[in-house]
Amino acid sequence: MPTPHTEELAAWTGDFATDPYAAFQALRARGPVHHVRFPTGDTAWMILGHAEARAALTDARMRHDVRHSAEYDSDGLYSIGRNMLQTDPPDHTRLRSLVAREFTARRIKALRARVQEAADELLDAMGPLGHADLIDAFAFPLPLTVICELLGVPGVDHDTFRAWTAKILTIGEPEASGRAAQEMTVYLAGLIEEKRHVEETDAAEGDLLHALVRAHDEDGDHLADEELLGMAFLLLVAGHETTVNLIANAVHLLLTHPDQLAALRADGGLLENAVEEALRFEPPTPAGTYRYTADPVVIAGTHIPQGARVVISLASANRDPARFPDPDRFDIHRDPTLTRSHLAFGHGIHHCLGAPLARLEANLALRALLDRFPTLAIDGDPTPDWRPSLLRGLSRLPVRWSASGLRTCAPCAR
């Protein structure tokens, strides 16, 4: 097979890492699949079209297990244990079922009051200040508090935990990322060991991590040590970092599109669709984890060889004009059925298990924030300061409001 032409993403005008959409648009115009080299130097086949991405997300030939890669040489490529994002059926089915039976819709619904309470507490602290970095003051601590309580993580050091996750997800700093992963591994191993010694009657209600440890100890062959460690890592990191970005990205989009913010303030019924449009327009996870072709694959006439690394660009698929009219316009009035066809949470058997919780947190967070701070605005330059991360998130979001114009939350009024 001839050597494929490689698109050099670093050569595109502008900074691809912070604004990839112009490159996506140009590439999609020439076809939905391309062989690319990222600014980091890594190469992969990238799927850019919505229809092609949706199909690839359910294609059994696209494997998550790195052992299908032609470049595979050791199991040392696992960062922290093995988790659902690094496995395929039947292992993936087994691991996902363990979490799914604890991560139920009933439990998520029951969290609503706690999410609202946590949001109100954070906004109470912000109110008198008149300004803040919304990420530090609100978007970060809210989902971290929720996921830690759900998993049964007592007294976690939020600042340390945030530093670990930020380093692990940062692009271009492998040594710092590796050190952070090692430190988090030690932390999680200790936490898991603590859970082993907690009696069932003493475990906090809804302690998901304790439930996973119990499943491991009841049948050691059912959940291996590295799988237990990997699941803890995935649930803690993915359970908060993506939602931090969802909340902050949605607020930034609304504050930089005043017509859309005005429409939302005039009609609160648009809130759910506003969250979905933010997910489409700036997905917190811009691409799925690497897939590896177990067999040769042909997509839209493009031949991808066996053992190839494949990236499914969720961000590009969500801006595909073949699916979304005027896709580069942020519009909370889009047809909700169309808007919710975005791929921000993936598709198929690897569809994000935490999507209902992320949607709950984002909807409650935005409603509480906009209700309490009617004069909320960006403080300074509105240009987004994107982090060099595997995820799509802002480094900071300075905002201001008139402290004299605050509204009182419903619980406080009583």
Image (cartoon, rainbow, N blue to C red):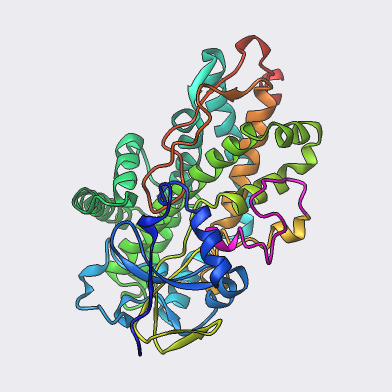
Which stretch appears magenta? 315-334
Residue at image location 28% in from the left, 82% down from the top: 70
Q: Is residue 111 left or right of residue 242?
A: right
Q: Is residue 264 left or right of residue 32?
A: right
Residue at image location 20% in from the left, 76% down from the top: 74
Residue at image location 25% in from the left, 49% down from the top: 187
Identify the image quadrant of residue 375: top right
Counting from the top left corner in percent of width and height, residue 69 is at 31, 79
The rendered magenta stretch, by its main secondary structure, is classed as loop
Counting from the top left corner in percent of width and height, residue 290 is at 39, 69
* Residue closer to the observer: 308 or 345: 308
Counting from the top left corner in percent of width and height, residue 73 is at 20, 78
**From where the camera sits, is residue 353 visible?**
no
Image position of 383 with respect to 320: above or below: above
Q: Quadrant of the N terminus?
A: bottom left
Q: Is 319 within the magenta?
A: yes
The outermost residue toward the top is 404
Q: Is 241 within the magenta?
A: no
Q: Is residue 136 left or right of residue 324?
A: left
* Residue closer to the observer: 319 or 96: 319
**From where the camera sits, is residue 23 visible?**
yes
Image position of 311 with respect to 156: above or below: below
* Residue closer to the observer: 291 or 115: 291
Image position of 12 with respect to 245: above or below: below
